[in-house]
Image (spheres, helix red, strand yellow):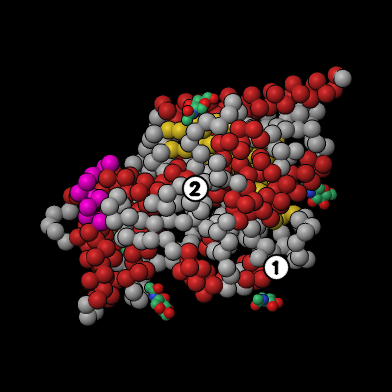
Amino acid sequence: MAAKLKPNPSDHLLILIVVFLIAIDSFVPSTAEFSSSKWYLISTEHWVGPERLGPIFVYCGNEGDIAWFAANTGFVWEIAPQFGAMVLFPEHRYYGESMPFGSGEEAYKNASTLSYLTAEQALADFAVLITELKRNFSAEGCPVVLFGGSYGGMLASWMRLKYPHIAIGALASSAPILQFEDIVPVETFYDLTSNGFKRESISCFNTIKQSWDVIISEGQKNDGLLQLTKTFGFCRTLNNTDDLINWLDSAYSYLAMVNYPYPSEFLMPLPGHPIREVCRKIDSMAGDNILEKIFEGISVYYNYTGKVDCFELDDDPHGMDGWNWQACTEMVMPMSSSQDSSMFPTFDFDLSSYKEECLREFNVEPRPRWITTEFGGHDIKATLQKFGSNIIFSNGLLDPWSGGSVLQNISESIVALVTKEGAHHIDLRASTDEDPEWLVEQRTTEIKLIKSWINDYYRQKRAVFEI
Ligand SMILES: *[C@@H]1O[C@H](CO)[C@@H](O)[C@H](O)[C@H]1NC(C)=O
Ligand SMILES: *[C@@H]1O[C@H](CO)[C@@H](O)[C@H](O)[C@H]1NC(C)=O
Ligand SMILES: *[C@@H]1O[C@H](CO)[C@@H](O)[C@H](O)[C@H]1NC(C)=O
Ligand SMILES: *[C@@H]1O[C@H](CO)[C@@H](O)[C@H](O)[C@H]1NC(C)=O
Ligand SMILES: *[C@@H]1O[C@H](CO)[C@@H](O)[C@H](O)[C@H]1NC(C)=O
């Protein structure tokens, strides 16, 4: 799900210059003895140091290469200097370079080697790293602020709740912590994705809606799969229409997530307002060949650079494969698509077939109630009003994940910052000259809130010293 980009090439420069990639061997003691390395990016360039209690900004790495998230989380790098903050980007175990058992191949071998891939273990890793690093820098007194986008945002908010002694606050951007069990309606995600297309063009929405039947009947013809392979420019011959449908489905969902107002390269190189562009292509094709229209439209997502010779079905350029395991164990997010309100093929979430698929693919049974048991979610307002503090839940309503996120203020210090035109954690991206006013304002509010957490902390510390 992860989820971001920055057109400014200096991003990469920044990382090359100030960041050291360091492997650590510290483990969460409760788990098995396996040799592993976990990686993190660190920059102390702007840190004012332990004497002045310089803050430590920690981005909770999510399901992909940490360098990719670091490059797409310009906000944290940009605000570090004004806070005199250290910046830390720990990688989530089982992603990127952070493979236990010596290699990705060994780590992903079977259900027992994968069993250490959990959100709780990832949080414990972050806690161990932060604690050890603080000790090494004699920075025990320095306040830690967590950041995260998407699943990383979920981790940031959960870490604030579970490790209040380690972090004083969290900015959880586009964090769908309520996308579990029956907390939000199952159609939410696909309805929001569909609305993103409908608001641009009803005919575009309708063309996509009609395309699924056309694909299925085309696939049933003699040589139909070969024809579809040619029409869509795949490198290898399609084995079934489901693969094509999933390929299109995920592109539409990703487009809704990265529907940013300016060009970006978070998941793919894309123009600004990419859904508008997809729909422009679909609507401007003359004639009534639905599949050609769909191909033109989808090429905006998969081939905007015009440099792709043929399409692979299973590209994973950002190393996000492990999410399937997580979805088959803890991260069971029920989703259906309705005939009426969505443009997707009708689909009813069914836990028993979900289970079967997980058993087939990983030999593991999902635990659909575990996340709410471990982290809560039901009646979150009542719970967190009394118990939690210092969390920002930021969301853009164009993002299909916003429907499973916290969109209401819970208390004085657990606040929801909601933007109508925002997409998936756009606030965490680096600023650009094209940033709309609402985005600039959102970031200003975030900075103000983070400052207030840190100042509260300093005030408390001083009080403690003075006694
Ligand atoms: C998984 O692989 C490991 C390492 O090869 C092996 O020791 C273990 O028995 C396997 N577990 C299962 C459930 O197949
Ligand atoms: C902390 O210092 C120890 C001893 O020098 C070192 O082995 C370890 O890697 C350091 N850990 C971190 C997170 O810096
Ligand atoms: C179709 O199935 C074969 C055999 O499993 C596989 O090698 C090939 O990659 C599949 N084609 C596509 C496009 O996935
Ligand atoms: C990608 O775009 C280029 C330029 O329009 C085109 O020549 C190429 O055929 C496209 N690739 C696919 C797989 O459609
Ligand atoms: C929550 O409170 C903040 C002020 O702390 C305000 O800026 C924001 O608009 C409120 N959010 C909602 C969803 O009402």
- Magenta span: predominant SS is helix
Residue labelled with disc 1: 101
Q: Which mark is residue 183?
A: 2
Viewer-side label of 2, 1: 2
Q: Nearer the viewer, residue 36 or 401?
A: 401
Image coords of residue 87 (percent x, y): 66, 39
Residue drawn where x is 22% and y is 80% of the image: 222
Image coords of residue 311 (percent x, y): 36, 65
> What's under tag 2, amino acid-wise?
Ile
The answer to whether residue 218 is magenta is no
Is residue 263 in view from this perspective? no
Residue drawn where x is 42% and y is 41% of the image: 423
Image coords of residue 322 (percent x, y): 56, 62
Q: Is mark 1 within 8 Å of ligand 1?
A: yes
Q: Secondary structure at mark 1?
A: loop
Within 10 Å of disc 1 (Cα), the crowding (few <14, some 14-19, many 20+) is some
